[in-house]
Amino acid sequence: MSISNPDTIKTYKGKQQFLQNIRDSYRRFYSAPGIVRFYSDILFYILFLGLFSFVLLVDYFPLNIYGGKRNGYANIHIPITEIVLHILLWTLIVEEIREFIIHWAEKRASSNRSIVRTYFTDDGWNILDCTAILLYLIGFIARFIVIEQAFIVSKYV
């Protein structure tokens, strides 16, 4: 692109540099570890809730012990979407265990009882996470008991 007027060139280069600075600022802001983690967490939770809703509303059936087809595959006991959901929930459990181990290592000098107490009092979300994990484990165990009442419990929990 040729611009004949030198003042226009300076102005054009100045605007271009200004826009480049703005782009660099946005790039640094959105690529910062905190915001990236926040966005990835939000994206994960939205996808997880969508998958969870789909599994419970559409694809959650009693165990396939009679060899019928699920998701186009024969002899699979639970749908593939449910398997993916269980994998995601087990990653949440592993993450909570990791957080607790880190907390334990930081508070090593305290008594065991105070370590557990501070784990729950320092961050209120830990209470909700542990409650959700406990309910999930109850539902997970009830899921594999081939009784209609256990299946209903697994669906409600």
Image (cartoon, helix red, strand yellow):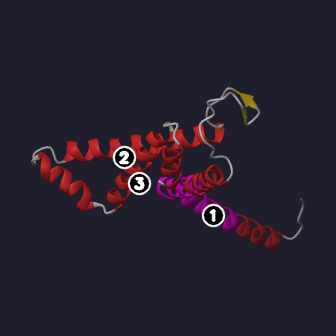
Mark 3, mark 1: which one is toward the viewer?
3
The residue sitting at 57% across, 59% down in the picture is: 30
> Can residue 32 be seen by looking at this rendering?
no
The residue sitting at 21% across, 44% down in the picture is: 104
Mark 1 element type: helix
Q: Please tell me which of labels 2 and 1 falls first in the chain.
A: 1
Q: Which residue is mark 1?
A: 21
Q: Give percent across and percent down for residue 61.
A: 63, 44
Examine the structure image and report whether residue 125 is included in the region drawn in magenta. no
Under mark 3, the amino acid is Ala
> Can residue 102 be seen by looking at this rendering?
yes
Q: 2 or 129: nearer the eye?
A: 129
Q: Estimate the spatial distance between the alpha carbons at disc 3 and disc 1, rounded to whole Å.
A: 45 Å
Marker disc for residue 132: 3
Q: 131 or 69: nearer the eye?
A: 69
Q: Which residue is mark 2?
A: 96
Mark 2 element type: helix
Give the residues drawn in magenta, as a range: 17-44
